[in-house]
Image: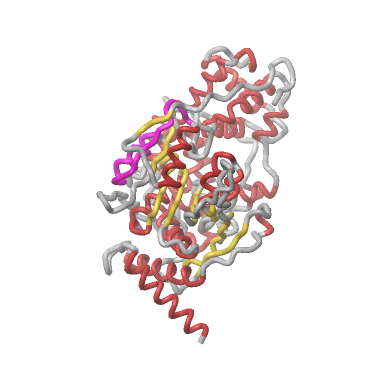
C-alpha cells in the first residue's frame, strides 16, 4: 500500500509538471522524448525530495554544509533506463537581518547556483553566506549548490590517468612549428580516444541540454514550484538553455559574466573570441605592472614588462623551476590573472622574484599539484571537454584550426595556441554532437531577469552579455565599466551588489540597462629589494 500511495503522489506531481512545463519539442518532434523523460524524472524527484545529511567524506566539505542526492536519468529519452545521482549541498536561510535588531527575514525558498566550467563544482557555494556581501541574500534564501553530472561525486567522468594529466614542464610557443602541432594533435586525438574508452556509451549524455534538464529535476526535488537560479560563466549558458526549455518554471534568474548564446558560436567561434579578448586583458595587466615598476622592477612600459615575461619564459625553457614549471606553466599562471585581477599582485611578485633569483613564489603558484589536486583537475577537464565537444559541431580537419588560429595568433598570441590545445580533442570526438538551441524568448514568456557583466571580461567577452540581453525579453543588463574581473555578482563592487540584492530580495530591476563604476585596481605588494609583504 505504501508503494502504491507513493506512486499515486508521484503520478499527481507528474501531471502537474507536464501541464506547467513547456514542451521541449513538439509531440513526436526533436526533443519530445527528452521532454517527456524530464517530466517523468521531475515528478519522481518532487515525490521523493532530498534527504540532507553529512556530505561525502571524500569531498572534504565543512560540517556546516549538508548534502543529499537527486536521481536523474543518464538518458532523458529513456527515463526508466540507467540512473545517475547528483550530489546537492545546502545551507538553510538564516532568517536573521545582518543589520541586527532581531528582525526576522521571511524565507524566499532556495537559490541554486552554478559556478561555470563546464566542469566546476558548486558544492562549496552555500558557504558564500558567511561572506558579508552575501549575508542579506543568505538571510532570505536557502543557498544550494550541486556537482553537475560528470563532476565528482556526481557520476564522475575521466579521460586519462590523473597521474598523467599534468605534463610539466612544457613549452608554450606562440608560433608553434609543424612538428609541435603534429605532436599536440596526436595528444588531442589520444585524449578523445581515452574519453570514449573510459566512459563508453555514456559519454554522449554529458552535454548542456542534459545539464539544463538536470536543473529542472533538482528544482523539483527541492520542492520549489519555480526556480531561482544564479549562474556564472558557463552557468549563464546553462541558465539560458533552462530559460528556453522551461520558461514557466523560472522565478528569478541572474546571469553573471555571460557566454555568448548565439548558436553559431557554440563553442568553436566562442573560443576564438575569447583568445582575442585575453590579449586585451594581458595588455591591461602589463600596463598595471608597468605603473608599479618601483615595486616589481619589471619595466616601466608594457613593452618592457613583455620583455621581462619573455626572459622568464626563455629561462624556464632552459631550466624549469623546481623541475615542474616551464613556459606553459608560466603562461597558465598568468592566464588565471586574466580572469581575476586579485591575482595581479601575486603573479607580478612571483615573476619579479624569479628574475631576481628566487623561484619559490613562482613554483608555489604554477607548480605541479598534489595527487588529490591532479585527480580533481583531470575530472574537471574531462567534463569540460565532454560537454563542449558534445554540445555542437566542431571542425574535424586540423587545417581549419591551424588556419584560423595562425591568423589570430598574429594579433593575439598570449592565449591563442593554449586555447587550441585545450579544445582540440573536439576535432577527434567520437560521440554524436547536439544541435545548439536558438535561445530566444518573447514578451511575457519569461519573468524579468538580471544580466551582470564586466566590460573588459576576457573569459566571457562583453558582447555575450549584450547578445543574451537582446535574446531574453524583459532582461536588464548591469555593466561594471572599465573592469575585467570574471564574475562580478557578490564581489567587491557595492553598486553591482546593490542591483543583485534588489533583484533577488525584492524582484526589482533598473528601469533600463545601467552601469556601475569599476572596482578599485588592486594594490601592489612585495618589494623588489627584499621579501614580499602581505
Residue at x-position 47% and y-position 82%:
5
The image position of residue 520, as x and y in percent, is: 52, 25
The answer to whether residue 425 shows anywhere in this view is yes
Residue at x-position 72% and y-position 15%:
529
Residue 467 is inside the magenta segment? yes
The segment highlighted magenta reads: 462-484
Residue at x-position 56% and y-position 31%:
337
Choose between 360 and 419: the one closer to the eye. Answer: 360
Residue at x-position 58% and y-position 44%:
101
Classify 467 as above or below 281.
below
The answer to whether residue 315 shows anywhere in this view is no
The image position of residue 59, as x and y in percent, is: 65, 55
Whether residue 238 sits left or right of residue 527 in the image: it is left
Residue furthest toward the bottom? 1
Choose between 74 and 24: the one closer to the eye. Answer: 24
Classify 355 as above or below 477.
above
**Screen quadrant of the C terminus:** top right
The image position of residue 354, as x and y in percent, is: 68, 23
Amino acid at each position: 500500500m505504501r508503494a502504491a500511495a507513493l506512486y499515486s503522489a508521484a503520478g499527481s506531481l507528474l501531471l502537474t509538471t507536464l501541464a506547467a512545463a513547456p514542451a521541449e519539442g513538439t509531440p513526436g518532434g526533436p526533443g519530445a522524448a527528452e521532454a517527456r523523460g524530464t517530466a517523468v524524472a521531475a515528478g519522481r524527484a518532487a515525490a521523493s525530495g532530498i534527504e540532507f545529511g553529512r556530505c561525502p567524506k571524500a569531498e572534504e566539505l565543512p560540517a556546516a554544509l549538508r548534502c543529499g542526492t537527486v536521481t536523474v536519468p543518464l538518458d532523458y529519452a529513456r527515463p526508466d533506463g540507467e540512473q545517475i545521482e547528483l550530489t546537492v549541498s545546502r545551507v538553510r536561510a538564516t532568517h536573521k537581518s545582518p543589520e541586527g535588531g532581531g528582525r526576522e527575514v521571511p524565507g524566499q525558498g532556495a537559490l541554486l547556483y552554478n559556478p561555470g566550467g563546464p566542469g566546476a563544482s558548486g558544492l562549496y557555494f552555500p558557504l558564500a553566506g558567511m561572506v558579508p556581501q552575501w549575508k542579506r541574500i543568505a538571510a532570505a534564501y536557502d543557498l544550494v549548490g550541486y556537482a553537475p553530472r560528470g563532476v565528482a561525486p556526481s557520476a564522475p567522468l575521466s579521460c586519462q590517468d590523473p597521474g598523467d594529466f599534468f605534463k610539466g614542464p612544457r613549452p608554450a610557443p606562440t608560433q608553434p612549428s609543424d612538428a609541435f602541432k603534429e605532436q599536440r594533435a596526436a595528444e588531442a586525438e589520444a585524449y578523445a580516444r581515452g574519453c570514449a574508452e573510459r566512459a563508453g556509451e555514456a559519454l554522449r549524455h554529458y552535454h548542456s541540454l542534459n545539464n539544463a534538464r538536470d536543473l529542472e529535476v533538482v528544482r523539483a526535488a527541492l520542492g520549489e514550484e519555480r526556480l531561482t537560479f544564479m549562474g556564472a560563466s558557463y552557468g549563464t549558458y546553462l541558465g539560458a538553455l533552462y530559460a528556453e526549455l522551461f520558461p514557466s518554471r523560472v522565478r528569478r534568474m541572474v546571469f553573471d559574466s555571460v557566454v555568448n548564446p548565439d548558436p553559431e558560436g557554440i563553442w568553436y567561434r566562442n573560443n576564438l573570441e575569447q583568445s582575442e579578448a585575453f590579449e586585451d586583458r594581458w595588455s591591461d595587466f602589463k600596463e598595471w605592472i608597468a605603473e608599479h615598476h618601483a615595486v616589481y622592477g619589471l619595466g616601466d612600459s608594457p613593452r618592457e614588462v613583455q620583455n621581462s615575461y619573455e626572459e622568464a619564459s626563455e629561462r624556464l625553457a632552459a631550466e624549469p623551476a623546481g623541475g615542474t614549471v616551464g613556459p606553459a606553466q608560466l603562461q597558465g599562471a598568468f592566464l588565471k590573472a586574466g580572469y581575476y585581477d586579485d591575482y595581479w599582485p601575486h603573479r607580478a611578485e612571483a615573476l619579479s622574484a624569479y628574475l631576481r633569483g628566487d623561484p619559490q613564489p613562482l613554483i608555489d603558484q604554477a607548480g605541479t599539484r598534489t595527487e588529490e589536486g591532479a585527480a580533481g583537475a583531470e575530472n574537471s577537464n574531462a567534463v569540460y571537454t565532454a560537454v563542449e565537444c558534445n554540445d555542437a559541431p566542431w571542425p574535424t580537419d586540423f587545417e581549419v584550426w591551424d588556419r584560423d588560429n595562425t591568423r589570430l595568433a598574429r594579433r593575439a598570441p598570449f592565449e591563442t595556441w593554449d586555447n587550441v590545445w585545450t579544445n582540440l580533442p573536439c576535432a577527434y570526438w567520437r560521440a554524436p554532437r547536439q544541435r545548439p538551441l536558438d535561445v530566444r524568448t518573447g514578451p511575457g514568456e519569461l519573468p524579468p531577469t538580471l544580466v551582470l557583466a564586466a566590460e573588459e571580461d576576457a573569459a566571457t567577452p562583453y558582447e555575450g552579455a549584450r547578445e543574451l540581453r537582446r535574446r531574453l525579453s524583459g532582461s536588464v543588463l548591469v555593466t561594471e565599466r572599465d573592469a575585467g574581473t570574471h564574475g562580478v555578482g557578490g564581489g567587491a563592487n557595492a553598486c553591482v551588489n546593490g542591483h543583485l540584492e534588489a533583484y533577488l530580495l525584492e524582484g526589482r530591476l533598473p528601469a533600463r540597462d545601467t552601469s556601475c563604476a569599476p572596482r578599485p585596481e588592486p594594490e601592489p605588494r612585495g618589494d623588489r629589494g627584499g621579501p614580499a609583504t602581505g
